[in-house]
Amino acid sequence: MFFLLPSTEPLPPENLQIKNGATSVRLKWTDPIADDKIKHSFRVIYSNEAHTIESFLTKEREANVLSLQPGTEYAFSVYTSVLELGKFSDDDQTAHSFTSLLWLFLRKLMMVNSSARSIKCASKGNSEKCEEKSINMIEESTDFNDNQESINPLDLITALFHCADPFLQQEMALKMSMCQFAVPLLLPNCDTKECTLMLWALRDITKQFRFHGLEENSIVLTDLPLISFVRLGKNPNLSKSEFLNKILSSKQQNYDTFICNGLVEMSWYLPRGEKKIDIFKDPVAMANLRGNISDFEVQFAFLSQTSSAVFLFCDDLDSNQTFLNFLQLSSKLVLICTTNDHTSRDNLKQRLAQMKLKTYSVILKDGKMNDAEFVAKLKKTVAEIVASSIKLSLEKMSMIATDLGIQVDENNTICQNAKERAERITRDIENIPDYKMKELPLQGKPWKEISKLEKEMCRLKKARKQNIEHYMSELKCQIQNLRMEQGNHRMNEAIHQFISGCCSNEQLYFLKWMKITLDSLTRKHLSRIQEQYRDACQNPKEDKERLRELDNQIASSSLGIQHFMRELSQLYESAHFQGNWNHSSLKKLPELCAQLMLNGFPLELIDGDASNIPLRWIGDVLSALNKLTTPHNRIRVVTVLGVQSSGKSTLLNTMFGVQFAVSSGRCTRGAFMLLIGVSEEFRSELLCDYILIIDTEGLKSLELAKLADSYEHDNELATLVVGLSDITIVNISMENATEMKDTLQIVVHAFLHMKEIGKRPCCHFVHQNTAEVAVHEKKARERKMFLQQLDEMTQAAAKMEKRGNKKKFTDILEYKIDGNNWYIPGLWLGTPPMAPVNTGYSEELVIPSDALNASLALNNSNPSEFIDCFKSS
């Protein structure tokens, strides 16, 4: 099946050294990835004064560049490349060594598989021995010895975070959060005895919940009360982790949230605003410190200063009396002890009365109190404390951590410089639509008018009885005037700063900070406008014009990196049209974007606001890709189509391990393309070096439904991306007859157009939200009826477009009734925000992944090069 190494932006090579020769250069650098098991290579790129670009790949940490022209100035760059598509067999599902155990866990985590912690390590032949042991919940009473034949499964997660670069750490934390795993808050270093606050690693986690209305924000910026659970003593009778899981889980759902891996972990309970379902009515964060607090004084000091309450599990008061007498907490203390009989219970109360310990509450668990009663008492105590507690965000906690000598992962020079760059661009943004008009003007009215005129040149709908040549000449003249108008705009400071950040050695951090900051601004602005819209709807006297104005503001309130890249594309198009390259950096933009694509960043193919493609820009970016990857530049294209909000981006992210933008309440606009490499051993099978994945906006969009040409827009979008594709995935999220029929009509029209130009692509249908065990077998009759529907639509579409007598769907493309239909369950196991990702979702996607693999391997057409693929459409 397909598997993509974690799609994070790799750290760049370090300490680049250059030694000049007469006609050659010798380059040496330091490998930023310490783990030899992580497959990666380096791409060397160099260009001369005439901007001629050359590149090659190497797995070594040095390279010789030969045949250079004497007296010519060259620019050299070296990039780390780990984004690669490979495959693994069923045998790879079992770990036969400690190293393979780590990779198996990481592979499952990247597929958002909630069973990732339940993998096992089993011995195989005479290879490295490994006890068959799960890395799921391990009770804290478990003692791990130094036996070389066993491994502490809890240390696996810690080791992964220590080995990962900052961007992989972010991706791991995000996936763990989606699976409802606890995430590392304080990561200890076994060698130095220091610990690190994982602020950067948690910045990508965004949560949505209902408290005082609907709230959505980064978990790092959300003010929440923190309840910490710690242990005093070495042999506890009660496991904190076990009861924490029970506190955070409903009766219907019981999943392990904490994995107790020797560090401070954090998880959250977030209400959905329904009293009958919510365990707590207030949102709350919970932390778990694994180990004896007497051995982790710094971590305990941090928790005591940041928590609303500390729940301390202690069974042996006698041995720990001295520690408890000197214990001073700024937070409320809840002491939890166990007793065996009534006598010991009375003795325990007497000992507590004699001690100087100031507690908020004492909970005694004896043999008469079962676990359910104990958990209910814990929940009640937590609820009482949370109702009147002080709230802190993780960002505010970082200042306390610094005062205690705890390192903060993002407090390094490169990260902070990138943050300052991003803040210089975004600090003045108050009203997003106004900002876009002022700072990003080229993608506004001029570009949208150009798009309309270019479409009219193809359609000639308004020509009527006019002379066609004269009419076309008028349209071209109008386009030229609009391009001249674009050229009159000077490059704004924001765009200048954006280009500078993209070209700096802080590029990866800079783009991440831009994404984080812009996403936060968009959420705040959208929330404010949507609240005004709700208030206006409830007022029967509200002017309809006001509602229309608010509706337009909501539609234009999105701001992301794609808008800045879109402005760059229009600057480039305008400069190329006028031949005016006043800014030398503009000529290098296609090369810059090509390198970003090689590093795993998605690039906008179709402008979703103007519904148009900047042809010159996209063509030159793909040309630059061609130069950078030659001679290994063969590609296959995979595209997804489906209705709005059907989970297309999530589907691609799970299948390929990529990072298309997904966010509740916001949908993909236009189309984005993302590039992944194919491993060497897989290239001969797929007959390509790269796979280009295209994510598209939803068909039948509610925003476009009110427009007269919405159906035409969907047809054009589907035709374009199908024309580019070797394989099209049609995503059907609900077995709704009307929705499915509308979607299929659009898809059939697109495939019919491809047949007319001699292209015969392949199509796979993925049916989501099908939960039956034997769904594939039970749906045999439905699949046959489904094919009949496709045949009927094919005949109707052929008749409508006068394309000949096409009687069957299989006349226009490759389709097998059993091999091209796939059924997967819904994404969430339960109701968000506390629902984990359904294990069946990621596991069932293995089957269509294998099918795509087979379809690509059986594709008889010659693979395209980057620029050829674009021109052929």
Image (tube, rainbow, N blue to C red):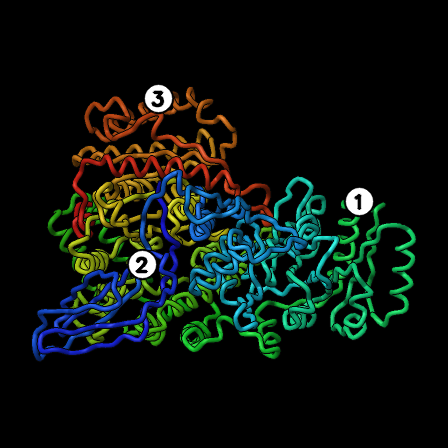
Residue at image coords 32%, 70%: 502
Reply above or below: 111 against 824.
below
How many other residues sit within 10 Å of disc 3, few (<14), some (14-19) or many (≥20)?
Answer: some
Mark 3 or mark 1, whichever is nearer to me: 1
Q: Amino acid at mark 3?
A: Gln
Q: Amino acid at mark 1?
A: Asn
Mark 2 or mark 3, whichever is nearer to me: 2
> Element at badge 1?
loop
Indicate which disc, 2 or 1, sits on the residue closer to the N terminus. 2
Residue at numbered disc 3:
788
Which circle marks residue 370 in the picture?
Answer: 1
**Residue 571 at x, y = what percent?**
25, 67
Q: Is residue 155 visible?
A: yes
Q: Is residue 478 visible?
A: no
Number of disc labels = 3
Q: Classify residue 850 by image quadrant.
A: top left
Report, in whole angstroms, how far the alpha carbon at label 3 lies from the one at label 1: 59 Å
Q: Amino acid at mark 2?
A: His
Residue at image coords 44%, 49%: 128
Report, in whole angstroms, how far the alpha carbon at label 2 lies from the one at label 1: 53 Å
Q: Classify residue 450 by image quadrant.
A: bottom left
